[in-house]
Image (spheres, helix red, strand yellow):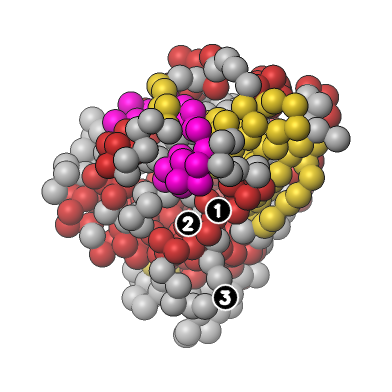
Amino acid sequence: MTDIAAARWPGIAHTPQTPFKARVARTILRPAVTRTPVRLTFPDGTVWGHGGPDSPEMAVVRPAAFFRRLGADSKIGFGEAYMAGDWTAGPGTDLADLLTPFAERLTHLVPKPLQRLRVFVDKKLPHHEKNSIEGSRSNIERHYDLSNEMFATFLDPTMSYSSAWFASTDDEPLETAQLRKIDGILDQAHVGEGTRVLEIGTGWGALAIRAAQRGAHVTTITISQEQAALAQQRIDAAGLTDRVDLRLQDYREVQGQFDAIVSVEMIEAVGEEYWPTYFAAIDRLLAPGGSVSIQAITMAHHRYLATRNSYGWIQKYIFPGGLIPSLDAIDSTLAEHTTLKVTERRSLGQDYARTLHLWREQFLANWAGVQAQGFDETFRRMWEFYLAYCEAGFRVGYIDVFQLQMSRP
């Protein structure tokens, strides 16, 4: 851990001094692993788990540090231990393959009597990460403004940072699948010649460009300055400057009427407190007879209820202020605060697992280019864990992603 920059990674460079909690974590983890088809290997030759020699291997490199992090905060410490190098995937083991059996059993790893104690140990969402107008800008900057060049090292040429939609062929290029996803959203929202479109969350401009190429007039909004700068360049290069109005603007500040409103994987960054505001804004801005299509990552309603107020590794290191809704939560918010309802659902969960796998392959293959931009080894392990962790979740259906069409009855 001598290479970890303490100023940049204070939670990683310093191991928690929690010997008692470490013993508790060890006591809980061992029987959990015995019910999981993996192997935990230790430097002294000890092996936990009932997986055979070909099962995924989790190599615990520094057991004392690993269990101390796990004991200090199980939801955050597991990922932090990977970032620190306290554990890693064994030789020949893909990280997502290792995490998948854990994801399948995530709700049963901890005994039910102990699960009831989570209310006493779960950390609450930090107040400074609330998604007010100012808070949202800060949260978005921490992720999407990292570096356009960094994202370009692993995204396809459309620069789409959301689930693709693959055909059945195994060798389909990611770019083709991303364009199919975009067309799916535009088709759900009935975007065509002359349609007035509002896009909430520009990304790097791919959807706005595609909509404008259909003959639509697009207003696209973002609060990421880095994304806006590159998206504008891409819009100009496509010769669509007169059809796309790109604004640095929060969704709460938009005025006007639009025939179609689209938003791709934006709701996860809105925050539960602001879901009514978000959907009410869409309802207010949608012209009579208009249609909405959003792409939303979701989880089962009982899991959403169990985790809605707790702070996890993803929120601390990847998406501050983020919260994944359930389909039920979306339906109830629409019913209580809008005149809209969901009229079509399309699941792309397995497509997201494949998308994430391709991103991780590209990220690791192009790591030298990312490192040359000033990102360190701890960042590499953080992003490798993030992409594999999410891939495992989508593989087993712990999380899903839907294209949701909404309209007024």
**In this picture, is 282 found above or below 15?**
above
Q: Amino acid at mark 3?
A: Ser
Whether residue 217 appears in magenta in the rendering, the answer is yes
Q: Is residue 373 left or right of residue 182?
A: left
**Marks 2 and 1: CB-CB under 8 Å?**
yes
Secondary structure under badge 3?
A: loop
In the picture of the structure, the residue carrying the numbered disc 2 is 179
Q: Residue at x 65, y 31 (%)?
A: 259
Badge 2 amino acid: Leu
Question: Which residue lies at the image location 16% right of the left edge and 42% below the top edge?
Answer: 374
- Which mark sits nearer the N-terminus, 3 or 1? 3
Please rate how many residues cluster around mark 1, counting C-alpha atoms within 10 Å: few if below 14, some from 14 to 19, many from 20.
some
**Disc 2 or 3, which lies upstream in sequence?**
3
Residue at the far bottom in the pictured view: 53
Q: Residue at x 78, y 22 (%)?
A: 337
Placement of 60 over or under 19, stated as above or below: below
The residue positioned 57% from the left and 75% from the top of the image is: 168
Q: In whole angstroms, how far apart are the C-alphas of marks 2 and 1?
A: 6 Å
Name the image quarter holding residue 281: top right
* Image position, residue 301 (x, y; %): 76, 44
Foreground disc of the pair 3, 1: 1
- Quarter of the image where the C terminus is located: top right
Find residue 183 and name its label: 1
Q: Amino acid at mark 1?
A: Asp
What segment carries the magenta color? Answer: 206-230
Which of these two is toward me, 264 or 59? Answer: 264
**Number of the label disc, if any, that sits on residue 168:** 3
